[in-house]
Amino acid sequence: MIGSIVVAVGYNLFLIPHEIMSSGLSGLSIILGMVTSINAGIFNFLLNLPLLVIGYLKLGRTFILHTILSVVTISIAMYFIPVQPIASNPILCSIFGGALAGLGIGIIFRCSASSGGFDIIGMLLTRRRDFPMGALLSVMNSIVIVFSGFLFSWDAALNTLVSIYVTGKVIDSIHTHHVKVTLMIITKKGEEVKQHLLSNIYRGVTMIDSRGGYSNEKSNIIMTVISRYELSEVKSLIQEVDPYAFVNITETVEVMGLFHKRM
């Protein structure tokens, strides 16, 4: 809900007053709100209804309930927050409005939800391939730029492009679910660490017998691949069993084979 309110603040105080569009269906809602007398928040809710049904069927009940909460919160906040400019410079408003929208959407993504619209399509695509969510949304949002150029002005379209670019970059800095890391854990408590990890995270591990090059003592190497979201939890789990474990963490370029992708 906090992320959704941040998104609405970015729309009503930075983007809409300067005829700068946001990304996805929210941008289309802003366009419809500008060319009609109906509030953009109402359009935002109505346009999202079909995709919410698709999301419920494809992405699961919990995810879509959280998304419905986000869409409703954004729509209500857009309805009640007054549309008035904070600054007079449209370029600055494009940057800061896009950053606020990206911050809010990134928070929403990290809570296993979406702000509706193209986000749901993006979530469906990233389930199949590990695309950066922000970059994917930026590509799909080119339709908003074209609409804003023809309906308003190409200055507005270029400012919209700046806003969408900044939004995508901020989302990718917060929503790092597509980033995978590989852990090489060297420990003398291999069995205990293995069982602790398997009991607390939904990941497989590989055990390798090893011997210290200097000490000549036997130990175990445990290898696993996890998402960036899980890294903090896994480090804590390792520390709980073996505070002296040596852990090498590297960013993974690509994963082939079975890897469970959670939202």
Image: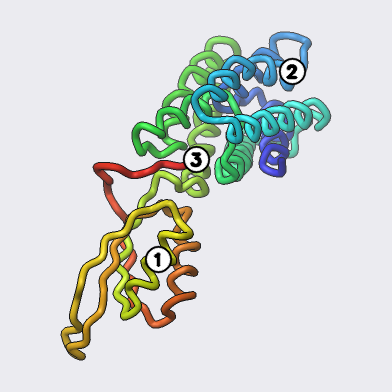
Q: Which residue is mark 1?
A: 195
Q: Of label 1 and label 3, which has the lower sequence position?
A: 1
Instruction: Say above or below: 149 vs 203.
Output: above
Q: Amino acid at mark 2?
A: Ile
Q: Of label 2 and label 3, which has the lower sequence position?
A: 2
In this view, the mark in front (1 or 3): 1
Tell which of 51 and 97 is nearer to you.
51
Instruction: Say above or below: 235 vs 73.
Output: below
Q: How many marks?
A: 3
Name which quarter of the figure residue 182 lies in.
bottom left
Q: Position of residue 134 (x, y in %)?
A: 46, 37
Q: Position of residue 43 (x, y in %)?
A: 69, 16
Instruction: Say above or below: 2 vs 117.
Output: below
**Residue in view at x 73 percent, y 22 percent:** 41
In this view, the mark in front (2 or 1): 1
Tell which of 65 and 11 is nearer to you.
65
Q: Which residue is mark 3?
A: 263
Q: Amino acid at mark 3?
A: Met
In this view, the mark in front (2 or 3): 3
What kind of element bears circle 1? helix
Tell which of 165 and 251 is nearer to you.
251
Q: Amino acid at mark 1?
A: Gln
Crowd band around label 3 with a 10 angstrom C-alpha radius: few (<14), some (14–19), many (20+): some
The CA distance from mark 2 to mark 1 is 51 Å
Name which quarter of the figure residue 38 lies in.
top right
Q: Of label 2 and label 1, which has the lower sequence position?
A: 2
Q: Which residue is mark 2?
A: 42
**Residue in view at x 77 percent, y 32 percent:** 77
The quarter of the picture where the N terminus appears is: top right
Q: Is residue 91 visible?
A: no
